[in-house]
Image (tube, rainbow, N blue to C red):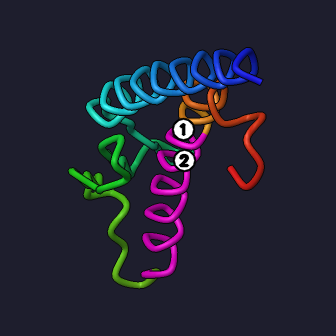
Amino acid sequence: MMRGMGNMGNMMKQMKQMEKKLAEEQKVMEAKTYTGVSPDEMVKATFSGKREMTDLSIDPKAIDPDDPDMLSDLVLAAVNSALKQIDADGKQTLGKYTNNIPGM
């Protein structure tokens, strides 16, 4: 019976090491910057790895008072582009730790 306890101890030690590595990689990812661009590059949205928008730049040519929906569409495209980058990076960076964990 004691033999099984040693294996459990090793497993716990490995889990602690994995948690530490995961936390370190998450901090690195959160420090990154992600910039999404609209298809015509008239709008750029910049986010931190924490999914917080840090900048939004709009080319004056994108501001058409007769077509405000166009500007909305450009902003949405740029924001969604940046968020997709964050998601893809998260899956690549953190996925190696969470792929085999149910519910993650």
Which residue is found at the position 33% from the left and 48% from the top?
50
The amino acid type of the residue labelled 1 equals Gln
**Residue closer to the observer: 68 or 56:** 56
Q: Secondary structure at mark 1?
A: helix
Q: Quadrant of residue 7?
A: top right
Q: Is residue 100 left or right of residue 38?
A: right
Q: Is residue 18 left or right of residue 55?
A: right
Q: Position of residue 103 (x, y in %)?
A: 73, 55
Which residue is found at the position 33% from the left and 57% from the top?
61
Q: Quadrant of residue 87?
A: top right
Q: Is residue 82 magenta?
A: yes
- Crowding around mark 1 (Cα neighbors within 10 Å: few <14, some 14 to 19, many 20+) is some
Q: Residue furthest left?
A: 54
Q: What's the distance in space between the residues labelled 1 and 2, CA to CA?
A: 6 Å
Q: Position of residue 49 (x, y in %)?
A: 36, 41
Which residue is found at the position 32% from the left and 68% from the top?
63
Q: Is residue 46 magenta?
A: no
The mark found on residue 77 in the picture is none
Q: Quadrant of residue 92?
A: top right
- Crowding around mark 2 (Cα neighbors within 10 Å: few <14, some 14 to 19, many 20+) is many
**Residue closer to the observer: 30 or 102:** 102
In the image, which residues are magenta? 68-87
The mark found on residue 81 in the picture is 2
The amino acid type of the residue labelled 2 equals Ser
Principal SS element in the magenta part?
helix
Q: Is residue 51 left or right of residue 99?
A: left
Q: Secondary structure at mark 2?
A: helix
- Location of the N terminus by quadrant is top right
Circles 1 and 2: CB atoms closer than 8 Å: yes
Which residue is found at the position 43% from the left and 63% from the top?
75
According to the picture, the residue beneath numbered tag 1 turns out to be: 85
